[in-house]
Image: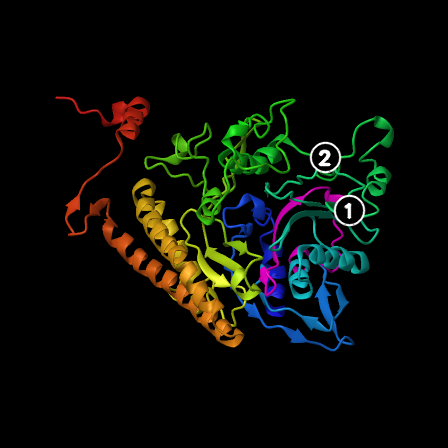
Amino acid sequence: MRYLVGLLIIIFSMYSPMVHSCTNLLVTKGASVDSATYLVYLNDGEWLYHLNQTNAKDHNIADSLTYTSMKGTKYKIHQVSHTNAIIGFQINEHQLAIGETTFEGRVELWDKDLPLKYWELMELALLRASTAREAIKVITTLVNQYGYGSEGESFSIADPNEAWVLEMIGTGGMGGAVWVAMRVPDGMIAAHANHSRIGEFPMNDPENCMYSENVIDIAVERGYYDPGSGEPFEFNNVYDPPSKQHIRYSESRVWSIYNRAAPSLNLSINYNRGIENAGRYPLFIVPDKKLGLLDVFSLVRDHYEGTEIDMRIGITSGPFGNPNRIRPLSWEDDSIKYTFERPISTYNTAFSYVAQLRNYLPNEIGGIAWFGVDDTYTSCYFPIYCCVAKIPEPFATGDINRYSKESAWWVFNFAANYANTRYTDIVEDIVALQSKTESTFISHQDSVELLAINMDKKQRLDFLTQYSITAGELVHSNWVALGNKLITKYNDGYIKDDNNKISTKGYPKSWLKRVVEEDGEKFKVTD
C-alpha cells in the first residue's frame, strides 16, 4: 500500500487538473430494497489503477509512518497497535467504505507543506476504524494533530448502519483543518460531485452533525463571513463559493441522480444552468422507491439521456450520437465562454466501485465492493467480498504506457474507445454483455452467500476469495473476447452479422439531412 500511495502522489501531481472529477452517491439502508447501505465512488483521475489488498496486522506502537507533503517535506505519523485488512483505499474487513470528490474551494487555505492528503486519510481511516463514526474521528484527529495537505474535499463514509458526508478544507497555515460532517438520515440518499454540498448545519445535534471548533472562527478571521450580516452560516457558500461554470460542472450530476431517483420532486435544471435565484438542490432526498443494486448501478450510468441536455443529441455528438467529449470541456471565442456538459459517465474514469454493506450478515459476507474500471457506462461490475486475501490478477496489473490484454484496465479502455468510432451501434453490444454478466453475478449472489454462511470462517474466507477471483477473471476474459468481436464486426465502415454477412448501414438520415443543410452544394449530384 505504501507503493500505491507514493504512486498516487506522483500521478496526482502530474494530472492535477483531472483529479477534480469524481462523483459519489450514498444510499442509506432504509432507502434500499435489501436494507443495505450503498456507497458509490467514481474516480475520474485518468490513470491506470492497480487494485490491491492489505492484510490485517499487529504493530509496535513505537514505530512510525512517513508521509511527504506536496512540497516534499517528510513527516512522521504515529503507528497504532493493529490495522485492519483493506481493499484498495475503498473498503475494509468491517464493511467500512469510503469515497471522495474534490471541490478545491478557497485555494489560499490549501496547506501544501502539511503531510496528510485526502487519499492517505482514506487509507488510514480504513486501516484504523471499524465504523463510519470511528472513521470520521480517525480522519479529524489525524489532521488536527499533523495537519491537512489537500484542497477542499467531500468524503463519503459508510458502514452497514450509517452513511455520512464529511467536508474538509485546510486552514491556510494555521494547522489542523476546517470540517463539518452530516449523517444522511435513514431512508434518504445523498450525492456530491466536486462541489461542497453542506450548507447550514445544526450546531447542537452531535448524533447527526459533527464539526471542527474553528469552522466559523476561521471564516470570520479571513473575511469570508460576517456574523453581523444576519445571514446564516453556510459551509459551502463560505468555503466553496460557487461560480456559474463550477455549478454547471458539478451540480448537473447531482441534479441528474436526484432527478432519476425521485422524479416526483420535479427538481429544476435552473440551478445548474446558473439561473439567478434558482433554488439549490437538497443535501439529502427520499427516493420515489427503494433502490436495488441494479438501480444503484444505473444511477451512475448517465449522459443526461432523455433531458434537455442529452449529450447524444446535437452537432457535438457527431453522426452516431456519441456522448463523449474530448478535454478540455471549456473554451472561449470572442471573449465569450462556452463549455460542454460534464456527465456522470465519462471515458476518463479510472475506476469505480459500489459498496454493498449489510448488517444482517457476517462482515466477510455482508460487505462487497462491486468493482469496475474505466467508463461506468461501458464497464462491468463484479463482486469482491471485503474479506478476500487476493485480487484478480487482471485488476492488479498493467502499465499506462503500454497496451496489454492482460490488464483489465486496458481491455475495457479498448472497447470504450473503439465505441467512439460508431457509438450508437457499438455501445449496444457492450451494454448487452454488461447486462448479461452483471445479471449473472446478481442471480448467483444468494446461492454463493448461502454456501458461505454454512462454512467455518477459514473455509468461508477461502471460498469467497476464490469466487471473487473467478468473477474478476470472467469479466476480464469476456471483455477480451468482446474487443476481438467489435473490431471484427465493425470494420472499414461495414457491419457484419453473426454469420459474417456484411451490410452497409450508413449514416443516420438525420445526419445526412444536416449535411445537406450545411454543405449540400458540395455533394449535390446534377444530371
Relative to 472, residue 525 above or below: above
- The residue at the point 27 percent across, 32 percent down is 508
Q: Quadrant of the C terminus?
A: top left
Q: Position of residue 165 (x, y in %)?
A: 66, 46
**Which residue occupies the extreme front position in the image?**
454
Tell me the crowding category of disc 2: few under 14, some 14 to 19, or many 20 or more residues within 10 angstroms, Cα based.
some
Corner quadrant of residue 286: top right
- What residue would you read off at disc 1? 206
Q: Position of residue 233 (x, y in %)?
A: 78, 34
Relative to 140, residue 426 above or below: above
- The residue at the point 67 percent across, 34 percent down is 242
User: Which range is magenta?
Assistant: 91-120
**In the figure, is residue 455 to the left or right of 224?**
left
**In the figure, is residue 503 to the left or right of 466?**
left
- What residue would you read off at disc 2? 237
Q: Position of residue 270 (x, y in %)?
A: 57, 25
Distance from label 1 to label 2 (Cα)?
A: 22 Å
- The residue at the point 15 percent across, 52 percent down is 499
Q: Position of residue 161 (x, y in %)?
A: 62, 53
